[in-house]
Image (cartoon, helix red, strand yellow):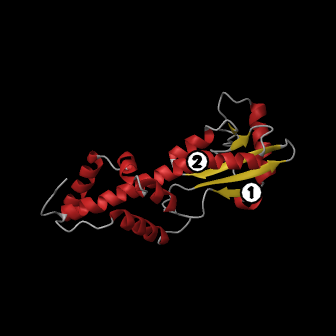
Amino acid sequence: MSTKLHHGCRLAAGTDVFAFIARLRTVLDPIRDELDAARLADNAVGLVDNADLKNEPRPEAPHVQAVLNWLEDQEKLDPSSRYYDPHRFELAIGYDAYTDRHLLLPFVDAEELQLAFVGMPEVEPYFYRGSFDKPEYISQEEWDERHAAWTRVLGYKSPKEAMLMMSLRNGPDAGSAFGEVFSADGALRLKDVAPSKEKRAWRLSITIYLEGSPRCSL
């Protein structure tokens, strides 16, 4: 078994695992869509700013072009890359028959999603980091119990082999975010997720430094 399960968790006793998965989606889906929306809005505004910087016509539909660019860039990446679908969330769920408890291993890069997951009342921290890296506030008995539980669930297999895997979505998908930002009232939503003027100015300054510019207009 891997001795470094930094993000290991355990489902609270008596929790129905399938009811938990359903609730997990209601908690994480809106956060993921918000993160996607902010990224697409940032990309769309960047297209406009870049056109102004180069004294070129602005794209007629920067929001559509931002989505197309995003999907095209994602297709070039290996699914194992950390840059592939940066707002993905996957969860490995394993059953320990000895304790009649479910152990959880989240795979997530976005801090917002990670914090929302561990903040759910059904989720208990149950990490394990090896024999010589026990926190002082955890007893040796409990630390040994964690090691035994994770060994029973994982053994020397990968989570995909030994546990049930669930994912919020299969790869990058801009559909939900597109609706979040560019729906009928998109003008109202866009201002909430659009990049700040400071970020836009910083991004343009980098472009000017690298490429030079005949004109800068914010």
Q: Is residue 174 left or right of residue 54?
A: right
Residue lying furthest front in this view?
184
The front one of 185 and 155 is 185
**Can you identify the residue that label 1 sits on?**
164
Q: How far across and down, in percent of the image, does residue 103 sit?
A: 74, 46
Residue lying furthest left in this view?
214
Amino acid type, residue under disc 1 in the picture:
Leu
Residue at 76% across / 51% down in the picture?
A: 94
Dot 1 falls on a residue whose secondary structure is strand
Q: Residues within 10 Å of mark 2 (few under 14, many from 20)?
A: some
The front one of 151 and 18 is 18
Residue at 65% across / 47% down in the picture?
A: 24
Name above or below for residue 28 compared with residue 182.
above
Name above or below for residue 83 compared with residue 113.
below
Dot 2 falls on a residue whose secondary structure is helix
Which quadrant of the figure has residue 206?
bottom left
Instruction: Tell me, yes or no, if residue 13 can be seen here.
Output: yes
Residue lying furthest top in this view?
137
Q: How far across and down, in percent of the image, does residue 137 sit?
A: 67, 27
Q: Is residue 127 left or right of residue 145?
A: left
Residue at 70% across / 58% down in the picture?
A: 165
Q: Residues within 10 Å of mark 1 (few under 14, many from 20)?
A: few
Instruction: Tell me, yes or no, if residue 3 can be seen here.
Output: no
Q: Which mark is residue 203?
A: none
Q: How far across and down, in percent of the image, does residue 21 sit?
A: 70, 49
**Can you identify the residue that label 2 sits on?**
28
Amino acid type, residue under disc 2 in the picture:
Leu
Q: How many marks?
A: 2
